Image (cartoon, rainbow, N blue to C red):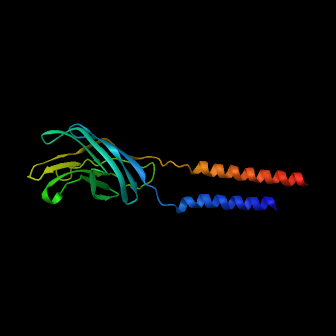
Amino acid sequence: MIKTKMALLGAVATLGVVGGGFVSPAQAIVYNVSANLAGGGTLSGFFDYTPTTYTDWDFTVSGTTLGLGQFNTTYDTNSSFILSSDSTGLQVALNGSNIGTGNYQYIHLSFTDALTGVAGQNTTLVRGTNPLTPSIMAADGGGGFASIVINNSGSSVTAVPWETDALSVIGATTLFGFGVWTKRKRKVDLSK
């Protein structure tokens, strides 16, 4: 009788812990980004993505020339905003950018494969064409603009594997239940 009750209690607890993982909200997957820029320089950084939503980003463009000078810029959640986004691309503009007045600075990442939001996904960046769909664009509002494209050889967009502590919690709960069952079993055996 005790074994049956303990087995039932263990099954209910296990189903509760495992089933809770299916009803919890989706967690953002972190994608690492790296690319070489045409004409020299690099793009590196990361963004968080759940299917359809970008929640965090931090990109650094360094060691390249844009227009007449050296171009080093960081686009992160504090200094930039999402201009447009979907599963195939992300366009982030620096705060203060105004496309309507022609005074802007943005970075456009276009992915060769649509993002899935699943850990372990790998894709690359689309090179873009200069100046129609550049990867990086800056304009001064006075008709002057400069752009850079990504050299797609060696670019990568990689989803970081999702880490969880759920297995250790399930293991600890199982061991605790086994300990309680063993203690009760010994107590019943001693009373006979």
Nearest the viewer among 28 and 86 is 28
Q: Looking at the rendering, in which quadrant would you find the N terminus? A: bottom right
Most extreme residue toward the left is: 142
The furthest residue to the right = 192
User: What residue appears at the point 28 percent right and 49 percent down from the top-left corner?
Assistant: 126
Q: Quadrant of the C terminus?
A: bottom right
Disc tally is: 0
In this view of the protein, which residue sits in the foreground, 129 or 19? 19
Q: Is residue 188 visible?
A: yes
Give how far across and how far down residue 64 sits, in percent. Answer: 21, 38
- Spot occupied by residue 10 in the image (x, y as percentages of width and height): 70, 58
User: x and y percent of residue 60 in the render?
Assistant: 29, 43
Residue at 43%, 52% (x, y): give it. Answer: 29
The correct choice, above or below, for 152 with respect to 29 in the image is above
The image position of residue 143, as x and y in percent, is: 8, 52
Q: Quadrant of residue 188?
A: bottom right
Q: Residue at the location (10% across, 49% down)?
A: 144
Answer left or right for 14 relative to 141.
Answer: right
Q: Is residue 113 visible?
A: no
The residue nearer to you, when weighing 115 against 183, is: 183
